Image: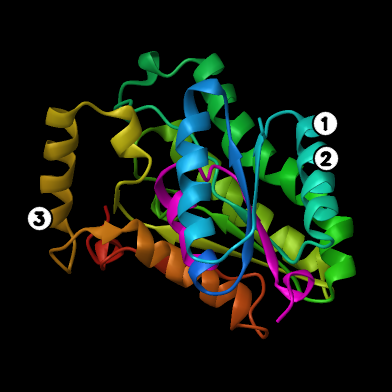
Amino acid sequence: MTPSERPVCLITGSASGIGASCATFFARSGWDVGICYLDDATRSDADSVADACTALGARTFVQMLNVTRYDDCVRAANDTATHFGHLDALLNCAGTTRFIRHADLDALSADEFTRTYDVNVIGTYNMTKACTDALRRSGRGSVVNISSIAGLHGVGSSVAYAASKGAVNTLTLSLARALSPEIRVNAIAPGYVAGGLPSRVLDAASLEKVEATYMRTQALPRLLQTEEVAALAFFLIAHAPGMTGEIVRLDNGLHLHAQ
């Protein structure tokens, strides 16, 4: 396969966590990857991910991206497609949260609700919209959104986060219908993932308590790894031509005990 024939996936939020694992998984599987980071503080992490992908034989393209800015999304989509010559898949991994007790409504301000929605929902829509033309030209266009079981059960780090992921699930269904048949759109709804978003917003002691709770409340007493989410994302993009409009739960059976 020549470099121009290798499939290309653009991955938001790929400087760390699930996004970074997706980048290396796709690189290991023969794909070239567009790697996105938020700001100067995460640039070195993105470069490290790119180095790991290059070592696996992939071509990479690293760029700064704020998914809440539509012009940023258009630039990222166009520059990635131009750099590689085409774009075949989009993985929306960029996300944000803060841990706020669900019953403490006074602690969840309208500004925090808006901030969470801007990244998790509007950002996912912005990026998908920006990539639509290139994905249609691909002939095998596919989008995978990283959602959460929080959006299925109203649980998770905050009411705002749960609501935003519920919106991502509905957005997935709407876009799957609107963009068919040229582009498939699916979502993954993980439970707690070690090395995922909570590890970037909680201190070590709080993270240990959260992980201990999940070990007690899941049907399977283990912690999901970011690589497991990456493997499922790759399957949905590369090996599931008959799947679109699906929200695939991956949670160690946590939903069996969700309240």
Q: Amino acid at mark 3?
A: Arg
Whether residue 87 appears in magenta in the rendering, the answer is no
Q: Residue 38's spot in the image, x, y percent?
A: 58, 30
37 left or right, relative to 153:
right
The magenta stretch is 1-26
Chain-order first, disc 2 or disc 3: 2
Q: Residue at x 34, y 42 (%)?
A: 156
Picture layout, residue 37 above or below residue 14: above
In the rendered image, the quadrant that contains the N terminus is: bottom right
Q: Which residue is mark 1?
A: 71
Picture layout, residue 91 above or below residue 48: below
In front: label 2 or label 3 = 2
Q: Which residue is mark 3?
A: 216
In front: label 3 or label 1 = 1
Few, some or many C-alpha atoms within 10 Å of disc 2 (few <14, some 14-19, many ≥20)? some
Whether residue 13 appears in magenta in the rendering, the answer is yes
Q: Residue 170's spot in the image, x, y percent?
A: 63, 55
Chain-order first, disc 3 or disc 1: 1
Contact (Cβ within 8 Å) of mark 2 with mark 1: yes
Q: Which residue is mark 2?
A: 74
